Amino acid sequence: MTVELITIGAELLSGHTLNTNARYIGEQLALAGVALSRQISIPDDHDTIVAAIRESLGRADWVIVSGGLGPTNDDITKKAIARVFNRTLVFRDEILTLLKERYARLGREPGPYLDTQAVQPADAEFVPNELGTAVGILLNDGGKWLAAVPGVPREMRPMISTHIVPKIAAQVKTAIHSHTWSTTGWPESRLYAALELLIHDHPDISVAFLPSELGVKLRFSARGADAQVALERFAGLVRPRLEDALYAEHDTGLEEVVGQLLRDKQMTISAAESCTGGLLAKRLTDVPGASSYVVSGYVVYANRAKTELLGVDPLLIEKHGAVSEPVARAMAEGALARSHTDCSISVTGIAGPDGGTPEKPIGLVWLAIALKGAETTAREVRLMGNREMIRARAAQAGLNMLRLRLFGDQQ
Amino acid sequence: MTVELITIGAELLSGHTLNTNARYIGEQLALAGVALSRQISIPDDHDTIVAAIRESLGRADWVIVSGGLGPTNDDITKKAIARVFNRTLVFRDEILTLLKERYARLGREPGPYLDTQAVQPADAEFVPNELGTAVGILLNDGGKWLAAVPGVPREMRPMISTHIVPKIAAQVKTAIHSHTWSTTGWPESRLYAALELLIHDHPDISVAFLPSELGVKLRFSARGADAQVALERFAGLVRPRLEDALYAEHDTGLEEVVGQLLRDKQMTISAAESCTGGLLAKRLTDVPGASSYVVSGYVVYANRAKTELLGVDPLLIEKHGAVSEPVARAMAEGALARSHTDCSISVTGIAGPDGGTPEKPIGLVWLAIALKGAETTAREVRLMGNREMIRARAAQAGLNMLRLRLFGDQQ
């Protein structure tokens, strides 16, 4: 099974846009046990698209095309596909009906060009787009498959993962089995050192480290009839070595795990944030249904807001500085008292690019957790990266401290 | 002048690594007025590399190859290049001398494999690598050029910008010039309708629509000696047609523009958020130096938090619902009064996936802005997408309302 990907758009070639679609599609295929064999970026030009699709069809069983669908693209991809397969473009009533129903449900007027979205190459299936009007195309001709999806990442992603990849995976004979685990708090090098001997002793299991600024996902893959059993045995050996860095034995965000802990313990929470400016509360409320445990958040960016909103003593700030253990504790305790929740978390730090000193460098962050009827705990972390990364990592460190504290209290 | 880029590495196809090299090289070429015409990612396999280079040389004047050079790559790219051009690989003493001198200067011992780095295809120039041992290759054969650089971004970048791109740019006759503008609030289809006739009447200007969930960037490009003048004239025609959708005549985020307005007017701000859960405050504080105008934020996720933190009358919530104009107004006015800022913004809406009703569907969002000594304004927006997109778009709509209100009050 060979799959090639053609990503269309001048913005991918001019350095304007990072090709995150290529990464996503490659990853989704890899998770389904299929290796992408080639990826090609070309500008949105009809003859170039026709030539590129023909070349890819000459080499591969499946060709996925992303981009060049949508109202302002003059349907360039559709026309190119119709040309490659010698098909006419036909108007599909059921697509227009579907799109109009969606607008009606939202109580909105459709924009111009909605009709053009209902045009498809003859005898093609369409791939629903739940988040936009550019529906996808799925076509089978002479044993070769072609799928076309729009280039807007949010619209493309569910179309690929729900409709295209499962179809490709179903055609694969010796599939790869894989598990993805989620870790945070340890750098890739520490995880590697912890697993190095195991990896060496198990050549049948391939281990991929997928780092992001929030943590490292681990992917264990194996092929063949015994793959599932081999993976389970390997998982049993890996688990204790990851200690508390492992937060889920699947691919998920820390906010989901923390949300589940709060739900299980029937606890409510509030957040008090300075340097993260709302990001920690945003992460907590990323989870659907978070309203059952998130009550409130306080973004106390100015020092006077720390005092007015949370009752932090101005003398405490003057004496220790806004980024300090006593202020972090006072923020958490202030949020707990004023929001009447079961727990609260606070974060105060120096995200940069200015404001660092030798004693309190950029990246220094204090976190505190207050629990009703228990001692408040606090810890310091020192984070690397630019302003955006430090803020993202500070929110993540806060969620992780919360996970460990709630999990610890559960036992 | 046509240039193609071949990026080599299985990690680019498996979703493990984002292809930032392709972006960097495309951008460097674009800055030099050269459009990359195709980018291809392939795995590190000898025959695949040979075939891909041959195909690219058949289409392009220049082929840049990145990756597959370096001690652990078994010199796969060098061997493939030698095969394509029918050249032998020769040992180059002067390269080894150069590498040894560098190690001596650094007071370090060279690692293994240093000798293999001094091997090059016969009659090729080498491209110095100031930050590593994998030197590049530059080769001219039958009017076609090939450049090969290592895949390590830190080493590749200066080689491209200092040695390769200037060489290509020197061969170009007519360079490309381009401007990128930032818009929000109008869907791509409406922008296109507003500009359609202009685009049609100016075939010398190419216009690209670059949509994201937060808005659409517009890129205008032209080629030739008159390009700058033509672009300025075109900009003058486009500007009034974009009305208030245009928020910057460069590529930037709305939080930067709003931040600059607040700074210019020496105003402070607070935010009161329900459905965005802190994201609006996070966006406001994404800007370095935001502490000079952001005082505080209130994440009032639970109804009782709206009352306790902002003084919203519970009867108002009971009568109109939490997602309503009166509650949005009361939230903004509560934040203004309690934070003592010059302005405040509120957002309350239904982000889903649950909680929608026929009268108040998922995606319904109320926004309000309170200004000291002025009338509070409110507006309703209806947003499409999943929970994450609705939250992202609600924060963006809030920032945009703020921009228009502050900008309006300025005039």
Image: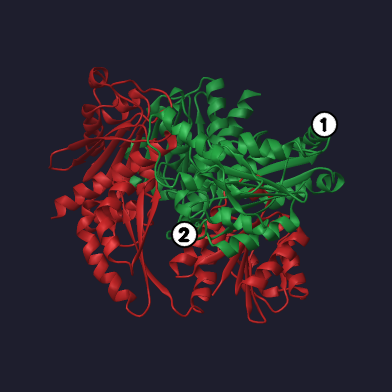
Chain colours: A red, B green
Q: Nearer the viewer, residue A15 or A256?
A: A15
Q: Is residue B207 above or below residue B251?
A: below
Q: Residue A366: x and y, percent? A: 27, 33
Q: Residue at x 59, y 55 (%)?
A: A152
Q: Residue A47: x and y, percent? A: 78, 61
Label 1: few (<14), some (14–19) or many (≥20) C-alpha neighbours in 10 Å: few
Secondary structure state at the residue bearing disc 1:
helix
Q: Is residue B254 left or right of residue B107?
A: right
Q: Residue B98: x and y, percent? A: 52, 34
| Res. A278 in view | no
Secondary structure state at the residue bearing disc 2:
loop
Q: Callout 1: residue from which chain?
A: B
Q: Callout 2: residue from which chain?
A: B
Q: Is residue B248 left or right of residue B15?
A: right
Q: Is residue B182 above or below residue A107?
A: above
Residue type at numbered disc 2: Gly
Residue type at numbered disc 1: Val
Q: Which residue is mark 2?
A: B356
Q: Is residue A278 above or below residue A100?
A: above
Q: Quadrant of residue B397?
A: top right
Q: Which residue is mark 1?
A: B229
Q: Quadrant of residue A4?
A: bottom right
Q: Comparing marks 2 and 1, which lies closer to the viewer?
A: 1
| Res. A269 in view | yes
Q: Residue A163: x and y, percent? A: 53, 71
Q: Residue furthest right?
A: B201
